[in-house]
């Protein structure tokens, strides 16, 4: 695992987040790397379901922080795709 893949954990927006949540996010980051935007929706839906089943619940502030961190370093097009995926997930809930 490269140091770059760990950089997102040092983002101040994630300060105070439970270590078990950060560990789950690291696992998701590794599993989700290289997935296309069309593959991300089912992947994220499955990940959310797994998180709920394991008892992890993310607050709306934590979710917003995670999304902002995910968008860092992305092109405007990639960030827009991520926003669309998030909006789809909100509608599905």
Image (cartoon, helix red, strand yellow):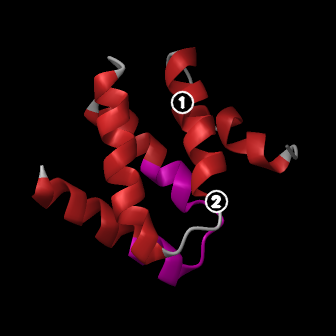
Residue at 67% x, 43% y is 8
- Say few, some or many: other residues with alpha carbon within 10 Å of mark 2 (under 14 / 14 to 19 / 20 or more): few
Q: Place residue 59 in its image quadrant.
A: top left
Q: Position of residue 22 (x, y in %)?
A: 57, 27
Side of 75 relative to 60 (left or right): right
Side of 40 relative to 4 (left or right): left
Q: Earlier in the sequence, mark 2 or mark 1?
A: 1
- Mark 2: which secondary structure? loop
Residue at 34% x, 60% y is 42
Q: Is residue 89 above or below residue 27?
A: below
Q: Main secondary structure of the magenta part?
A: helix
Q: Is residue 9 above or below residue 44?
A: above
Q: Which residue is mark 1?
A: 24
- Mark 1: which secondary structure? helix
Q: Is residue 57 visible?
A: no
Whether residue 7 appears in magenta in the rendering, the answer is no
Q: Is residue 2 above or below residue 32?
A: above
Q: Place residue 10 in its image quadrant.
A: top right
Kindly report the distance in space between the C-alpha atoms of the residues bearing marks 2 and 1: 14 Å
Q: Residue 33: which disc?
A: 2
Front residue of 37/7: it is 37
Q: Position of residue 15 (x, y in %)?
A: 56, 24
Q: Is residue 65 visible?
A: yes
Residue at 49% x, 24% y is 21
Residue at 52% x, 75% y is 36
Q: Position of residue 55 (x, y in %)?
A: 32, 17
Residue extent of the magenta highlight: 67-81
- Say few, some or many: other residues with alpha carbon within 10 Å of mark 1 (under 14 / 14 to 19 / 20 or more): some
Whether residue 72 appears in magenta in the rendering, the answer is yes
Q: Quadrant of the N terminus?
A: top right
Front residue of 15/33: it is 33
Q: Position of residue 37 (x, y in %)?
A: 46, 74
């Amino acid at each position: 695992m490269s140091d770059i893949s760990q950089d997102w954990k040092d983002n101040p927006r994630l300060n105070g987040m439970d270590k078990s949540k950060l560990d789950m996010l690291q696992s998701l980051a590794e599993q989700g790397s290289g997935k296309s935007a069309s593959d991300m929706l089912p992947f994220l839906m499955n990940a959310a379901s797994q998180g709920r089943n394991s008892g992890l619940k993310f607050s709306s502030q934590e979710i917003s922080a995670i999304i902002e961190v995910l968008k860092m370093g992305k092109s405007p097009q990639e960030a827009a795709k991520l926003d669309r995926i998030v909006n789809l997930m909100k509608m599905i809930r």
